Image (cartoon, helix red, strand yellow):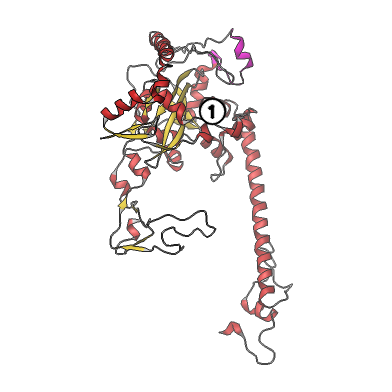
Amino acid sequence: MTVYCALCNRSFNGQRELDQHVRDSSAHKKLKVQLPRVKQQKQVASNQVQSAKAQALSIHTSTKRQRGQPPITTASSFSTSNITRPVIANNPRVVNSSWSVVAESEYTTVLNELSTHCHSPMDLKENGYILDPFNPLDYVNSRKCTRCNSQETNAIGRECNFHPRKRNKWIEKKPYKCCGTKGKGCRTSPTHDFQLSLRAIKHKDFRKTPAASGEPKFRAVTVDCEMAGTSGGTGEVVMLCVIDYITGAVLLHRFVCPREKITQMRSSIHGISKSTLDNANLQGQALSGWEGARSELWKYIDDHTILVGHALQHDLDALRIIHPRIVDSGILSRNAVGIRRIQWGLQTLCSELLNIKIRNKKGGIHDCFEDVLATRDVVLSCTRDKRAFQTWAERKRSEELHLQKERERMRQEKEDERARKDLLRVGGGSSNRICLSPNDEDEEILRWSDIAEDLGWPHPDTGYDPWSD
C-alpha cells in the first residue's frame, strides 16, 4: 500500500518506510523541536473544551481577540429555553469592533426572523445545492466519455474520436500537442470510456445532517471553508471556521488536511501555505480530511440548526453534507434584486450594505475567519433592517436595468456598423432607406433585393442579377 508524506511531497511503499523516513528526515527533526510548546498549548485548549462541555454547551472563547475578530462571548445552545447572555457588556475591546452584537432581548426575534428566511428546496436546487442522497438513476444519462467528452446518449453507435494529449495553450492557435492540429480527434477507438462526472462521484459520499435528539445543539451557525485542489480533480477543504450566529462565539477554527495529494494549494486566494498546513497536521492540530471536518461540525448542529453562509453550496459540497435549513446571503441578495443571472460577492455586500471593507490584505486574500464574521453581519442586516435592504435592492435593480439597456444599445450599434461595413465591402455605397434600428416603428423591412438594387444590380448592360442564382 502506497502512503504519502505531505511535508516532503513523497510517496512510500508502506507505513514502515514512512516511519523510517520521519525518523531520519532532517525536515521532520526540525519540527520536533517545537512540539513541546505546541503540546502544552494543545493541553490548555483541551482543558478549555472540557470546561465548556461542563457548562452544557455554554461555550466560552478564551483566545485573545485579534483585530477583526468577534468579542469573547458565550454561545447559545439549541435546547435551552433561555439563551445565555454573551459576556461582553464590560469588555472595552467590543467598542472598537466593527461586527454586530445582538442584545439579549433580541435573541428570540433574530432567530425567528432568520428562520423565516430559510430557502425553499426549489431555490436551493436552482443554486446548486444537493438535497437528496446519491441515486444511480439520477445519473443514468449523464455519463461522458473521458477521451472524446461525448455524452453517452449522443455517442451510441459512434466511434470514439479523441486527442490523447491536451492543447498547447502557449501557442496562439492552441493546437493539440499530439498532432499539432485544432481539428477533431487524431485517434479512433471502437468503444468509449464512459464515466460519471466528478460531482456524481463525490455525491456518493454525501450524508444528511443527523436528526435532532436529546443532546443540545446550536440553533444557528455561520460556516465558511477554504479549499485546495487535489489529485482527484476536486476542491477539498483545508480550513473550517464556524461561529454561533447569535453571539458570534467561535465554535471551530481548524485546519483540515486532505487525504488526497494537494496539487493546487491556492495560497493566492486564502493565504494558507502548504508548509503551514503540513506543520499543523504533524502537530496534531489539523482535522483529518473532509470526514473529520464533517464529524467535528456535526458535534454542534443537527437537522434543526440553520446554516448561514455565502455561496454555501460550495462549502457543503466540500464537506459532503445534505442540510435542509439554509440561509445564503448570495441567494438573499439575488432574490431581493430580482435578477437571477447576477450574484453579488461577499466583499461587495459588505461594502454596500455594511460600509465595511474586507479582504484588505495584499492581493485581496480571503481570511476564513473574517469571511464568516462578514457573512453573519450581512445576513443580520438583510433580515433585521429590511427597509434598508429593500432600498439597496431597488437601487441595484435600477442600475442593472440601466446597464442592460446600455449594453443592448451598444450591441445594436456594433451590429449596425458591421452591416454598413459589409455593404461597403461588397460594392460600395450605402442607402438611407436601410434602417437597422429595432425601435423605429416606421422602419423598412430589409430585403436582399433592396441591397442588390443599392449596389447597382441588375447590371445595366447584361441584366445579370446575382441574387437570382
Secondary structure found at label 1: loop
Which residue type does callout 1 highlight? Asp
Does residue 1 appear left or right of residue 151 in this picture? left
Q: Quadrant of residue 409?
A: bottom right
Q: Give whichever of 356, 179 is nearer the camera.
A: 179
User: Magenta stretch?
Assistant: 90-105
Quarter holding the C terminus?
Answer: bottom right
Above or below, comparing residue 70 to residue 456 in the picture: above
Q: Which residue is mark 1?
A: 367
Q: Residue furthest bottom?
A: 461
Q: Quadrant of residue 355?
A: top right
Q: For the point 33% across and 51% down, which residue is it?
A: 143
Does residue 68 appear left or right of residue 315 in this picture? right
> Residue 57 lies in magenta, yes or no?
no
Q: Give whichever of 333, 93 is nearer the camera.
A: 93
Q: Position of residue 422 (x, y in %)?
A: 65, 71
Q: For the point 32% across and 46% down, which residue is it?
A: 138
Quarter holding the N terminus?
Answer: top left
- Say if residue 303 shows up in the picture: no
- Say if residue 53 shows up in the picture: yes
Q: For the point 40% across and 25% down, which residue is it?
A: 26
Q: Position of residue 296 (x, y in %)?
A: 37, 23
Give the number of marks: 1
Q: Position of residue 187 (x, y in %)?
A: 35, 63
Q: For the point 63% across and 31% down, which residue is it?
A: 351
Above or below, comparing residue 29 to residue 170 in the picture: above
Q: Position of residue 59 (x, y in %)?
A: 44, 13
Label 1 crowd (10 A; few <14 / some 14-19 / many >=20): some
> Residue 96 lies in magenta, yes or no?
yes
